[in-house]
């Protein structure tokens, strides 16, 4: 990137709670005050945005720096901030996370005015890692949320550790845009002494890899891709719908054609696909009903852990999902998680077993 442009990465989660990261290829300079990047919220839903430590060296759970590895897990709903090797902020719920703990945060609009740190579509989140002070902080729409994590008190020494790297975890379907600089909307890192994330990435090496991959593409593959695109456009036209082509990584559904209505308005034109769409809605409703019936389960009638295990992994997953609890792990882990809830009121479910969609 040049001084007048920025590198932006558009992400959409395709799984229940997917995690992505921007890995750094250069060490943090000794005189650097810290690092900065921004995230633009595109869909306004649940996401945990922040920082994580790089994987420890040596192949074990901890390496030369004595750190635990950042281990996100989509199955169990663990992402940025859910372990002791990462720090996360979720503006959908107005919470920050670290090591399994969570706390509410507010936006400081002025010395005498604060509000819940809740984001909306189009908001920009500033993510700062201040190495000189050993803290992680955030801003929302240009307003400071304040120091949310003291890295020096999180079981590590920020002055001797490798640099944290940007990491995000998103609920399925959520979309965000990561801006790693050098130009930003909410902050000018150079003026504050921080480095943009792009300054710690070896772009020459990345470009060489990209060129190599492009050179390996055959003319046959390119022709096949062009044919597929043409076929998709033809199919969409045949169904009476228009094909919308958007930014890479973001696919929009077909848009129904319009015809002129009265008073200069546009009215959606009915097409041959309408009946199929209605049938699809009915099938979806029936499927949801079927899943709800399958998930119904009287936990109090389960007499022992071994009886819970007899349900099997798939059934245990259905039941845990219906309760809004984490559903991943082995057969033993799922059974133990479910059986541990026996006799508890919903509001007493331990936070460690609650999933991202848990509601009271």
Image: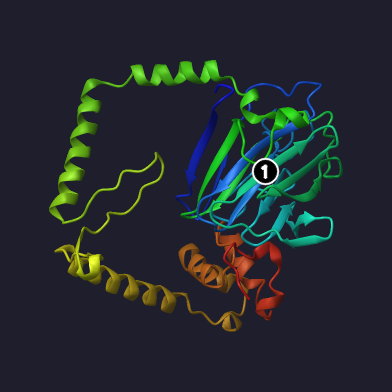
Q: Nearer the viewer, residue 330 or 149?
A: 149
Relative horizontal placement of residue 134, taking residue 22 as reference (left or right)? right
Q: Nearer the viewer, residue 2 or 351?
A: 2
Can you say whether 137 is above or below 114 in the image? above
Locate the C terminus by quadrant: bottom right
Can you say whether 296 is above or below 37 in the image? below
Locate the N terminus by quadrant: top right
**Image coordinates for residue 39, horizontal then vertical, percent:** 59, 44
Q: Could you classify mark 1 by the number of other residues whose Cα lies within 10 Å: few (under 14), some (14-19), or many (20 or more)?
A: many
- Would residue 84 be seen by someone viewing this image from the given angle? yes
Q: Nearer the viewer, residue 292 or 269?
A: 269
Q: How many marks?
A: 1
Q: Which residue is mark 1?
A: 126
Residue for point 68% across, 38% down: 187
Relative horizontal placement of residue 238, taking residue 280 as reference (left or right)? left
Q: Quadrant of residue 54?
A: top right
**Image coordinates for residue 269, horizontal then vertical, percent:** 19, 64
**Image coordinates for residue 246, horizontal then vertical, percent:** 36, 43
Can you say whether 106 is above or below 262 in the image? above
Indicate the secondary structure of the residue bearing disc 1. strand
Relative horizontal placement of residue 140, taking residue 280 as reference (left or right)? right
Residue for point 72% across, 43% down: 85
**Image coordinates for residue 184, horizontal then vertical, percent:** 62, 35
- Would residue 194 be seen by someone viewing this image from the given angle? no
Residue for point 54% across, 27% down: 5
Residue for point 77% across, 43% down: 136
């Amino acid at each position: 990137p040049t001084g007048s442009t920025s590198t932006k990465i558009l992400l959409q989660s395709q799984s229940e709670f997917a995690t992505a990261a921007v890995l750094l290829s250069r060490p943090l300079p000794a005189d650097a005050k810290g690092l900065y990047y921004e995230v633009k919220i595109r869909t306004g839903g649940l996401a945990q945005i922040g920082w994580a430590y790089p994987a420890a060296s040596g192949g074990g759970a901890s390496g030369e720096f004595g750190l635990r590895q950042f281990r996100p897990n989509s199955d169990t709903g663990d992402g940025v901030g859910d372990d002791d090797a990462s720090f996360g902020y979720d503006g959908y719920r107005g919470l920050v996370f670290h090591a399994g703990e969570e706390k509410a945060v507010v936006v400081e609009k002025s010395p005498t005015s604060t509000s819940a740190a809740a984001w909306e579509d189009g908001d920009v989140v500033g993510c700062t890692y201040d190495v000189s002070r050993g803290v992680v902080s955030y801003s929302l729409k240009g307003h400071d949320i304040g120091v949310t994590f003291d890295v020096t008190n999180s079981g590590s020494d920020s002055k001797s550790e490798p640099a944290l790297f940007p990491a995000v975890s998103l609920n399925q379907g959520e979309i965000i845009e990561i801006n790693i600089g050098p130009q930003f909307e909410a902050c000018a890192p150079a003026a504050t002494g921080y480095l943009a994330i792009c300054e710690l990435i070896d772009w020459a090496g990345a470009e060489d890899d990209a060129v190599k991959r492009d050179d390996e593409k055959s003319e046959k593959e390119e022709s096949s891709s062009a044919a597929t695109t043409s076929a998709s456009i033809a199919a969409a036209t045949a169904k009476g719908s228009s094909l919308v082509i958007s930014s890479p990584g973001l696919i929009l559904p077909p848009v129904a054609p319009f015809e002129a209505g009265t008073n200069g308005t546009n009215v959606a034109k009915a097409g041959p696909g309408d009946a199929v769409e209605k049938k699809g809605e009915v099938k979806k409703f029936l499927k949801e009903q079927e899943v709800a019936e399958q998930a119904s389960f009287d936990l109090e009638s389960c007499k022992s852990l071994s009886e819970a295990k007899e349900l099997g992994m798939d059934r245990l997953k259905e039941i845990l999902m219906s309760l809004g609890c984490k559903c991943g792990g082995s057969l033993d882990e799922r059974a133990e998680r479910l059986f541990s809830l026996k006799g508890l009121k919903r509001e007493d479910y331990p936070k460690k077993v609650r999933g991202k969609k848990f509601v009271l």
